[in-house]
Amino acid sequence: MIRVELPAHLRTLARVTGEVKLEVEGRITQRSVLDALEARYPVLRGAIRDHVTQQRRPFLRFFACQEDLSHESPDAPLPDAVASGAEPLLIIGAIAGG
Amino acid sequence: MSGVRVLVGTRKGAFVLTADGKRQQWDVSGPFLGGWEIYHLKGSPVDPKRIYASQSSGWFGQQIQRSNDGGKTWEPVGNKFVYDGVPGTHQWYDGTPHPWEFKRVWHLEPSLTDPDTVYAGVEDAAIFRTTDGGQTWEELSGLRGHGSGPRWAPGAGGMCLHTILIDPSKPNRMFIAISAAGAFRTDDAGKTWQPINQGLRSEHIPDPTADVGHCVHRIAMHKSRPGVLFMQKHWDVMRSDNAGETWQEVSGNLPTDFGFPIDVHAHEPETIYVVPIKSDSEHYPPDGKLRVYRSRTGGNEWEALTKGLPQRDCYVNVLRDAMAVDSLDKCGVYFGTTGGQVYASADAGDNWAPIVRDLPAVVSVEVQTLP
């Protein structure tokens, strides 16, 4: 079970509270986790990744296990602790705007 | 008894203000979609309970929300706005080519006949349409395909398509306006478009009378005379009596002819309203006095409307989509400010009072007149 923590506005949009827990088939990567997240919550399509390019939106970052994974390949394996469910994948909105 | 519902888009959410036909006692509900920029909300003329809202965020991009109960509850619908084909380039601020990039929806214009059909004006400038209540959107790419796109450039607020007017007498005719490209008209339901900017003069572009490149801030029409258009340009208030073929300046005795909104009285097609702003580098009213100007002669002769509006130390702006009228008798006029006030007049502008004073900065105001 993969754990994902969303920023508050995306929790509101997806109408969830707390962490999201996802079953993800195959390799656990940014892409496979986000694909599963968007399949469960279609309203999040376009809100984390661009609809067409699938690139991360510029003001969002992906953290896990005290590391910034934002610039890793979307197909790189996520840390074992994320894959095992011990740690969540954090989707973070940049602190900006004063 | 009839009433009104005022739909207010702000930098931090949507608000719905309601009153009966007297328009004296107001109920304020919201914020809806709190924390998001709501550039525009507008209800379907066919089904007033159906309202569409453009919700956007620098972090999370664009959402479109739909209400089926007059704004009490909202549901997200489709947010995929993808340009048709290879988008090409427009001019950047420095004159270099810059690729078209979707940023947000500025304006939503529901069809006059079908509650599931809506037009969306977006930044970077283009027009999209849904025919399934907002679930899917397709570009009417004939506008960008007009051929002048490489000469369009962003205004200070971005290269936005901010005005969409549907001609109630000719179902295939629409007018749009882009900052900074100008006004365009289609006579075949959006397949092809022509620029309608003859008579405009803009000193900030290399050829002041070019066919495109003008920073049009807003255009308006009266539904009984859709061939007569009124325009607030970056500078200059303009009028066309031939569906945009040619324009004449009607700034007349305005204290400044810079401004953003322009609107037409619901029952008097020659009565129009603007809010003069000091200049393009000073986005506030002249002399710290918030004044709506009304012309009862279709322009040129203007009178200041001040009763109930602050006449000292007022330095707010009124943005292009932040003025609207109701169709009660007498005609109600409404506008919102960047200072968070929404002002209403229940007597065509003679007297004003704030409905609310402390909302987030107001981006848009629309009014529904309810049976």
Image (cartoon, coloured by chain):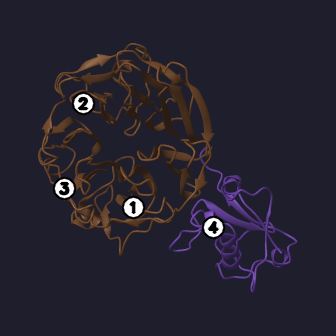
What is chain B's hue in the picture? brown
Residue at figure coordinates x 17%, y 49% from the top left: B197
The answer to whether mark 2 and mark 1 are in CB contact below 8 A is no
In the rendered structure, the answer to whether residue B361 lies left or right of residue B149 reads right
Where residue B319 sits: x, y (%)? 40, 37
Instruction: Name the mark on residue B195.
Output: 3
Of the image marks 2 and 3, the number of the one nearer the N terminus: 3
Which of the chains is purple? Answer: A
- Find residue B129 and name its label: 1
Callouts 1 and 4 in the same chain: no
Q: Label 1 near label 3: C-beta < 8 Å?
A: no
Asked if residue B306 is positioned above or below residue B355 in the image, the reply reads above
Query: Secondary structure beneath disc 3?
Result: strand
The 10 Å Cα crowd at callout 3, few under 14, some 14 to 19, many 20 or more, is: many
Horizontally, is A30 left or right of B279 in the view? right
Which SS class for mark 1?
Answer: strand
Say which mark, if any, is on residue A42. 4
Considering only order in the chain, which callout, 1 or 3, is on the residue closer to the N terminus?
Answer: 1
Is there a contact, CB below 8 Å, between mark 2 and mark 4?
A: no
CB of mark 1 within 8 Å of CB of mark 4?
A: no
Q: Amino acid at mark 4?
A: Pro
Q: What crowding class fits label 4: few (fewer than 14 Cα within 10 Å), some (14-19), or many (20 or more)?
A: some
Q: CA distance from mark 3 to mark 4?
A: 39 Å
Q: Amino acid at mark 1?
A: Arg
